[in-house]
Image (cartoon, rainbow, N blue to C red):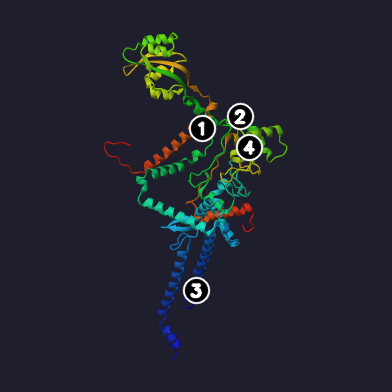
Amino acid sequence: MKRMLALACCALLVAALVDGVTWHRNRLRTALVGNYADALPADPALHQYAKQLALTAYAKNCAGCHGAALQGDTRRGVPDLRRGVWLYDFGRVSDIERTILYGIRSGNAKGRNTTDMPAMGILHRLTPGEISDVAAYVMSLTHQGMDSPTVARGAAIYQGKGECFDCHGADATGNIDWGVPSLNDGAHLYGDSMADITTSIHDGRHGMCPAWVGVLDPATIRALALMLHDAATGNPKA
Amino acid sequence: MKLDQAVSARAAQDPARRTLLLSAAGAVAGLLLGGYALFTAGGTIAAGVPPEDVALVNNRPILQSDFVTQTQIETGAPFHDATPADRQHVLREMIDEELLVQRGLDVDLAASDPDVRSAMVAGVNLQVDAEVLASQPDPAALRAYYAAHATRYTIDGTMDVRDLVARNAGGDAGALVAALRGGMDMAAATTQYGFLDSGRLGHGDNYDFGVKAKFGDALYQAAVGLHDGQVAGPVTEDGAMHVLVMLHRKPATQLGFDAARDTVWQDMQREARAHVEQANLDFLRARADIRVAAGFSP
């Protein structure tokens, strides 16, 4: 009889433990998705929970392009997610979450599909010489010692015939509403060598990111956004 | 005998009953705990709004992320700066929209409203076309496409031509042509030989395609090969005699590859989109049950 009682107590304890863990995870999940993305509590347990959730999903769905260590790949224009340089909006958790939800040029109507970098060379909007001049000008925004006359010609094309200013801005700071990169922060998606920049201008760029809404659950998407935000901001809670 | 002593005595007499009671108590406790866990686990919330949503409208969620974005769009400010009234206003709008969308689905608006159908078709094609729209031009492919379709890349010619038609059966077309070719003033010759301007074509330069549309094929073919100052005719059309006088001709010009690149790229993309859209339709057709009535063919 005593043995049976002990077994029953053990079973109850195990059940209570399982339920306790479930309850705790539900509490964290609710905190994760129930708060506004940009107002998540500074709770280390919450960030840790999100990170655990995100790491599994990241390894399965994102690492193939973005790399196991978030390092990206300049050959394919995949951003280094650790740098905190965001094409769209301000890099808030909500901004990152939106990109993950609906993607970039993903075919989702809510995706970030505003604009492309035109192939100025292939479509002969600029001559090879003009492209070299503009590339030199772009290089000069982040590198010292560029040839001044070439840079001056490139700047004139940038502000004139090339119409680069129209998207990238007269001051080359880009446009976060359209996903147009800043050219003077040294964070070139496709590499920052003269050859890389020349290729970007000549061939154009049209990076893509799939839409994950309906594929991943909302908590996982929020967790990914939080993890990436933490990684980019060096959040010690991450 | 005290009560507890009586229970103990009774229990001692009936161990099977005690076992049953304890088992039942354990089962009830297990059911309670299991039920709680079941109805509070993620994705199985049966009552209330899931935490990732701001509202459920007939069980369809309005995602918090969408609400935040919509609020920021409408207020033009970060979400945390939106007042409660702003948020309330936006949420009401989103709920209203969801209600109307659901109503549209209920009454199967897509079956009857051409705008809804067009929007749905465009939405599906946008998804299918995503890869094509994000593709980059390949120089060799551009050049090959241009070479295969060079005749498409021309600038249409223009002409300023007069169509002189016999005023009546007495018009002398042969004499008019001879007089015009001999250098006689067109107005004087037209009057003298019983002709008048048909008025089918405006004076001044007209694009070839416009001339063709207004003249018809026979007259257009007679006109298109003329150079400045040349006269064609007589040409008979619908029983009437026509004489054509070309005042100014600018023939169609072939665009070189460099000049045509933009258009070539657009054409390639258009064809690629048509290709993937057709492939999608083929796939859908293969899965669909389509029956066509006798005498019709799709």
> Marks 4 and 1, Cα distance to the nearest angstrom?
22 Å
- The percent position of residue B206, horizontal first and vertical second, equals 45, 23
Q: Chain of mark 4?
A: A
Quadrant where the image shows the C terminus of chain B: top left
Circles 2 and 3 on the same chain: yes
Residue B231 visible to an observer of this rendering: no
Helix, strand or loop at mark 3: helix
> Marks 1 and 2, Cα distance to the nearest angstrom?
17 Å
Q: Chain of mark 3?
A: A
The residue under label 4 is A197
- The percent position of residue B121, horizontal first and vertical second, equals 41, 42
> Marks 2 and 3, Cα distance to the nearest angstrom?
82 Å
Amino acid type, callout 4: Ile
User: Residue at position x 63%, y 37% from top?
Assistant: A197
Helix, strand or loop at mark 2: loop
The residue under label 2 is A127
Helix, strand or loop at mark 1: helix
Closer-to-camera residue (A122/B220)? B220
Q: Assess whether mark 2 and mark 1 are in contact (beta carbons under 8 angstroms).
A: no
Circles 2 and 4 on the same chain: yes
Q: Assess whether mark 1 and mark 3 are in contact (beta carbons under 8 angstroms).
A: no
User: Residue at position x 62%, y 53% from top?
Assistant: A231
The residue under label 1 is B265
Q: Nearer the viewer, mark 3 or mark 1?
A: 1
Amino acid type, callout 2: Thr
Amino acid type, callout 3: Cys
Circles 4 and 3 on the same chain: yes
Q: Earlier in the sequence, mark 4 or mark 3?
A: 3
- The percent position of residue B166, horizontal first and vertical second, equals 35, 15
